[in-house]
Amino acid sequence: MAEQTSSRPFYRRQPGGELYCGGVSLEPVAKRFGTPLYVYSADQIAERLGMFQRALAGLDHLVCYAVKANSALAILKLLAKRGAGFDIVSGGELERVLAAAPEAAGRVVFSGVGKTIAEIDAGLKAGILAFNVESEAELALLAARARKLGIRARFALRVNPDVFADTHPYISTGMREHKFGIDIKRARMIYKHAAGDRWLEAHGVSVHIGSQIRSADPFGAAIERVSKLVTQLKGDGIALKAIDAGGGLGIDYHDGSFDAAAKVEEYAEALIRALGDFEGQLQIEPGRFLVGQAGALVARVLYVKRNGNKTFVITDAAMNDLIRPALYQAHHEIVSVRPRTGKACVVDVVGPVCESGDFFARDRKLPPLEPGDLVALLDAGAYGMAQSSNYNSRLRAAEVLVEGAKARLIRRRETIGDLLATEQL
Ligand code: LLP
């Protein structure tokens, strides 16, 4: 069965038995906190962070969790406690890190192509590790704000290495036609120019080629190009302290027997090989790999309906809760929390939102489902809740963190009061 494997924390104690996360049975949890409900395994998140830390133990390194994947405060806190830094892309994400783990401010890198003055100022005042700068105009603004506040700015240029990574076009970022980064050929000149500004400190260089990349090769190729630049800069008298390899390592949304630890080792080896004799710090920015498989979206079946020869299973979760299938044609395994016996049927699993794009699975063969049954959409810990919305004026789901044998509410379900709070007549 897809879920009875090592890469997911969701499993059955006996074949055909109820679904658990860690020591917790999901049925009573769903009853207690309601559905749709995001459930995360704290143990798996910690375990995944440990995999990166161990694979990079031989060199100076910092794992900066990409907050955008899942910005729940409780998750940020548990990662910070284990030594993680953070990759942020907005002032809002900075505030989340400061709220969850103020001691981690010095381990924050700030990425993003459109930082505002207010966001730059907030980052400078918080004393973050580095700004990953995406344009010459941004670097000029950073220098001006640093001078104004009297706080020296550490920066890394985010270079665009022009490396192809095989992934969905919406989440590929490392080629010249993408909006991200600075052409690697111009970077040397920009560093040299910045060396004359006493408010700027060239801390490092960063790169991020995309997301959900399954092969280690493109990461190695990107770092090779970056390492060449670092060597040239050294010759110019500019000694960078860090190389930030970005995030992007993919998970297997289909096959639960995927060996996460082996994947991390392969990835780390590719990076280390490409670093050559670089002696500074290696930073990485994983998001999905740390939290994706740790989370499931638990939903209740509302109706089962037949239209012609199609069968629709309508759940109380919808595209506003998990938009990945609609947006990227992404695959998520769907399993029954308490499976029924009987013949599997081919069904579409859909939500109540008024769009045909509101589906979780199309023509999927699933064991029998009836109204009232609970299903779990697996591998939903990354870019699930983080990309949720109030579309159709639906209330955002609650979130639960499982630690050992305990399930703890880390975000209550939204109320109608929350929904209407920012508006006036
Ligand atoms: N660093 C930077 C600069 C990024 O832009 C991203 C993701 C990451 C790190 C983390 O990448 P990860 O390790 O999670 O692949 N919503 C899409 C994914 C968008 C990724 C955007 N950038 C999805 O649901 O697949």
Image: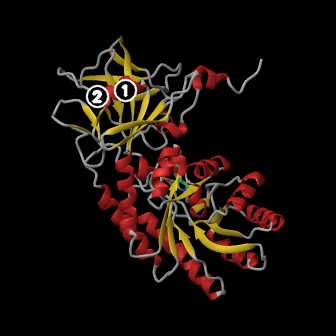
On the image, which quarter does residue 195 sit in? Answer: bottom right
User: Who's the residue at 38% across and 46% down the image?
Assistant: 42
Horizontal and vertical percent position of residue 81:
47, 57
Horizontal and vertical percent position of residue 174:
55, 59
Q: Which one is in front, 247 or 26? A: 26
Q: Residue furthest right?
A: 148
Type of amino acid under label 2 = Val
In the picture, the quarter occupied by the C terminus is: top right
Is 24 displayed left or right of 89 in the figure? left
**Residue 146 appears in view:** yes
Q: Within 8 Å: ligand 1 and the Cβ of disc 2?
A: no
Q: Secondary structure at mark 1?
A: helix
Q: Secondary structure at mark 2?
A: loop
Horizontal and vertical percent position of residue 300:
37, 21
On the image, which quarter does residue 148 sit in? Answer: bottom right
User: Who's the residue at 56% across and 64% down the image?
Assistant: 207
Is 360 situated above or below 193? above
Is 284 displayed left or right of 53 in the figure? right
Residue 337 disc label = 2
Kindly check if marks 2 and 1 are in contact, taking CB atoms under 8 A apart as contact: yes
| Residue labelled with disc 1 | 30
Task: Name the colouring of the figure.
Answer: secondary structure
Is 173 situated above or below 314? below
Give neighbour class at mark 2: few <14, some 14-19, many 20+ (Cα, 10 Å).
many
Give neighbour class at mark 1: few <14, some 14-19, many 20+ (Cα, 10 Å).
many
Residue 222 disc label = none
User: Who's the residue at 58% across and 27% down the image?
Assistant: 390
Type of amino acid under label 1 = Ala
Q: Nearer the viewer, mark 2 or mark 1?
A: 1
In the picture, the quarter occupied by the N terminus is: top left
